[in-house]
Image: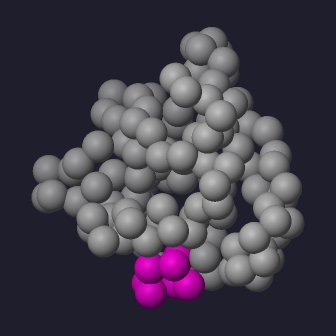
Amino acid sequence: MTSADGFELLFSYGTLQLEAVQVATFGRKLSGKPDQLVGYRLDQIEIRDAEVVKTSALTHHPMLVRTGQTADKVAGTVFDLTSAELAQADSYEVADYRRARAALASGGSAWVYVDARDDG
């Protein structure tokens, strides 16, 4: 979850991969590396927060659904963020999401935004 250089690792499978969202949220374009989450699939949720819709230009965002099946994988990007940037990501995400730790296919772990109703 924390990289060797002290940054927080955040796995993004959705709008935080968009350059416009990164610049609006963090003030910069992020660099990252591709990875996957195992045991998840994607669904869609409607976003009702006008500021988030304006920033992402999307009314529906992807949402992780935990399946626990090793055959289910979600591709995304792992970004290095400062602690302050991780807090900014928390502010960007609507109440339908919560931040949780998840294992990456590469063997590490990272923060990821999951369905807030999923208590696992």
Magenta stretch prevailing secondary structure: helix
Q: In the picture, which quadrant includes the N terminus?
A: top left
The image quadrant that residue 85 belongs to is: bottom left
Name the colouring of the figure. one colour
Residue at left offset 66%, top offset 18%? 67
- Residue 7 vs 71, above or below: the answer is below
Where residue 83 sits: x, y (%)?
27, 65
Please provide percent x and percent y for residue 119: 55, 27
Q: Is residue 106 visible?
A: no
Residue 15, picture quadrant: bottom right
* Residue range highlighted in magenta: 22-28
Residue 59 placed where, x, y %? 85, 66
Q: How many marks?
A: 0
**Residue 39, how many percent across, how many down?**
58, 21
As drawn, is 49 to the left or to the right of 15?
right
Identify the residue at the far left of this view.
5
Locate residue 36 relative to residue 109 in the image: left or right: right
Q: Residue at x 48, y 62 (%)?
A: 90
**Residue found at x 47% / y 46%:** 99
Q: Is residue 87 left or right of residue 61?
A: left
Q: Residue at x 78, y 77 (%)?
A: 50
In front of the other: 96 or 2: 96
Confirm whether the magenta stretch covers residue 23. yes
The answer to whether residue 33 shows anywhere in this view is: yes
Q: Is residue 99 magenta?
A: no
